[in-house]
Amino acid sequence: MPTTAPSVGTDLMREVVTAVLTWFYDTEQPRGALLACNGPSAITGGVEWLPRLRLGFLGDPLWPSLAMSTLYFNNAPDPRLPAGADEEFLRLLEELGHTPRAVRRFNPRPNHNAHGVGVELDRQMHPSLAEAVQNWDNYVCAEHKGQNPAACRDSGTCEWGAQAKLTIYPSWPAGVDSYGLG
């Protein structure tokens, strides 16, 4: 677990946010791609970036959201975002042409001291991205019946795992650790 305060450089923040926006709106997913609604996440300097994709009733795409949060747990010396990071994040979205539809700041909950800010963005996600999320929600692996789709994603032995590998993820900038791919 991190033991130093998180830091967010303005240039790296711009690169991460641009990568996510490009992925949300401009990256066409291949037919048959599968993607969990919690999407891929990334870590930079103790700050976690959380792209989220939700579908409405009958699979209608809703507006994607992006949150930045600290990664700190109970032993953290300072679980807050760096001073001004949330305002910089919101300013950057505006500068890149996205007025958040909703902004939510969050504070710690038991055993998790993360602080952060999440925004619901102003445009619906690319239709193929919405389709990939709907595919994940509706897919049942014949080989791994009843299991969470993530259980067989990397197995390489089932159709689901092969389809999951079709998914295109954000092109994260150098210095970013990604995880939770789908």
Image: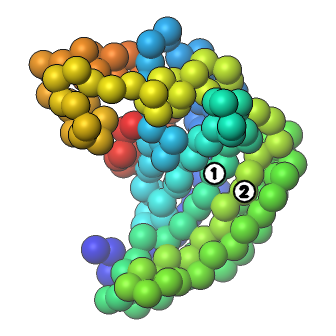
Q: Secondary structure at mark 2?
A: strand
State the mark number for residue 127.
none
Residue 48 visible from this viewpoint? yes
**Colour pattern of the rendering:** rainbow
Quadrant for the N terminus, please: bottom left
Q: Is residue 4 above or below residue 103?
A: below
Q: Residue beneath label 2, please?
A: 119
* Quarter of the view holding residue 26: top right
Quadrant for the C terminus, please: top left
Q: Residue at x 44, y 63 (%)?
A: 45
Q: Is residue 78 above or below residue 128?
A: below
Residue type, numbered disc 2? Val
Of mark 1 and mark 2, the one earlier in the sequence is: 1
Question: Picture coordinates of residue 68 (x, y %)?
Answer: 58, 61
Disc tally is: 2
Q: Residue beneath label 1, please?
A: 66
User: Closer to the camera, 38 or 89?
Assistant: 38
Q: Residue at x 51, y 41 (%)?
A: 37
Q: Is residue 43 above or below residue 151?
A: below
Decide if residue 4 is on the left or right side of residue 130.
left
Q: CA distance from mark 1 to mark 2?
A: 6 Å
Decide if residue 22 is on the left or right side of residue 39.
right
Residue 150 visible from this viewpoint? no
Q: Are marks 1 and 2 in contact (CB under 8 Å)?
A: yes
Question: Which class describes the residues within 10 Å of circle 1: few (<14), some (14-19), or many (20+)?
Answer: many
Q: Residue furthest top?
A: 31
Decide if residue 162 is on the left or right side of residue 157.
right
User: Closer to the camera, 127 or 66?
Assistant: 127
